[in-house]
Image (cartoon, helix red, strand yellow):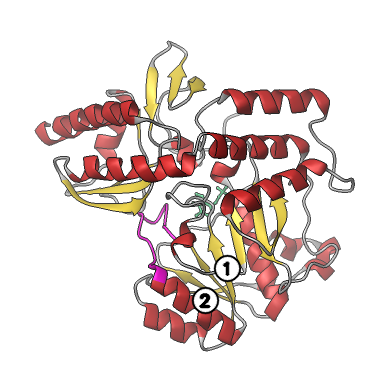
Amino acid sequence: MNIYDVYSFYPLAPVRGQGAYVYDAQDQKYLDFYGGHAVISIGHSHPHYVKMISEQVQKIGFYSNSIENPLQLELAQKLEQAAGISGYDIFYINSGAEANDNALKLASFYNNRTKVIALENSFHGRTSAAINVTHTGIKYQAPINHGVTPTYLHYQDIDAIISEIHKSDAAAIIIEAIQGVGGLDDISAEALVAIRAACDETDTIMILDEVQCGYGRSGTFFAYQIANIQPDIITTAKGMGNGFPIGSVLIKSDKIKPAKGRLGTTYGGNHLACAAGIAVLDVIKNEQLIQNSQRLGTKLSEILTNLPGVKKVKGRGLMLGAEFEFPVAEMRKSMVLDHFLFTGSSSNPNLLRILPPLNINENHLDEFKTKLTAGIQNHINA
Ligand SMILES: Cc1ncc(COP(=O)(O)O)c(C=O)c1O
């Protein structure tokens, strides 16, 4: 059987990882400033993470959501504390797309609307409204499952966003505080505050998709926290499990009240996933990774700004984009295959997306600078 051919990939296969590095079968070492697509938050195979997951699987790895699982509560409490948020309930799920699907569904349940305001260049995942073809789930189909009507607006066109919300016909507005796939543009704190107010006036649900920019990546726990607002719903995944599939929907439950059966999942919040999630938050706290993301992010941004060919640096913390004067696809490929450095792409062909683990140090930055400089020089001279 072949692998269904939907991915473009490099001809290499990492067989192990440690910290900011992955290694292939010949023990070639690669510096990972892509974090496995913004997923690796605490470094590859962190010893505490390995220990927690190994010990958990020896006890119990999985049972369904029809029993109590105290690990779910422990993870929720640690997340609340790490993020400095209150008033949210948590619904566990397995991926970012599913987290957003459920968030949109909750918004539609809440105000019975089906339109969704999203931003140009947004990326929120690939799931479809699968419940719409699930006959046994008819009573769990929200109006939004019958067809989402999206309206896309530019992140800087705040007047257009506010007047769209004021039409009072959108279930939700969904926002990445820093766009990942879209190319590292970030919405301002003032815009977030204005959107919050407009949502309150019109009973529109404000969803912050923190799947990529959350979990300390941007130098605050959630990227939206540059603004003093409380979203109605926050979604997480990626960094939450450091590679173990786990996501969550954080819901203001005094406003969006739970009802039995409306949401559900077999795997979400299972014992192993929770052990992974708890280990991640332990390491973020013990190693002060949010502060590290902020501090090293500033240094990394300076390094990038001064490299040849770089026009502009975007993003915050360790979620950065270097926009070059030329398309970067060939250079990025050569950096992996010739310089053993992983970086990411985005929908902007000139932009290199940089998403290292949050526990890198100055030595990693030096190594990155050397490799990237060599890659740029080769590209320019070619
Ligand atoms: C902001 C954002 N939301 C949602 C998703 C979808 O997450 P997943 O691939 O886990 O479904 C992604 C994935 O890149 C993302 O960057």
Coordinates of residue 97 in the picture (x, y in percent): 59, 54
How many numbered circles does the render carry? 2
Marks 2 & 1, CB-CB < 8 Å contact: yes
Q: Going 79% across and 67% down the picture, which residue do you hit?
A: 258
In the displayed orientation, state which residue is furthest to the bottom: 167
Q: Going 42% across and 58% down the picture, which residue do you hit?
A: 178
Cβ of mark 1 under 8 A from ligand 1:
no
Dot 2 amino acid type:
Arg
User: Image height check: is 234 above or below 290?
Assistant: below
Coordinates of residue 372 in the picture (x, y in percent): 24, 32
Disc 2: which residue? 196
Q: Which residues are magenta?
A: 177-189
In the displayed orientation, state which residue is furthest to the top: 26
Dot 1 surroundings within 10 Å: few (below 14), some, or many (20 or more)?
many
Q: In this rendering, would 378 be left or right of 293?
A: left
* Residue 267 seen in render: no
* Residue 36 seen in render: yes
**Majority secondary structure of magenta residues:** loop
Q: Earlier in the sequence, mark 2 or mark 1?
A: 2
Dot 2 surroundings within 10 Å: few (below 14), some, or many (20 or more)?
many
Dot 1 amino acid type:
Pro
Q: Secondary structure at mark 2?
A: helix
Q: Nearer the viewer, residue 73 or 128?
A: 73
Coordinates of residue 175 in the picture (x, y in percent): 49, 65
Disc 1: which residue? 231
In magenta segment, residue 245: no
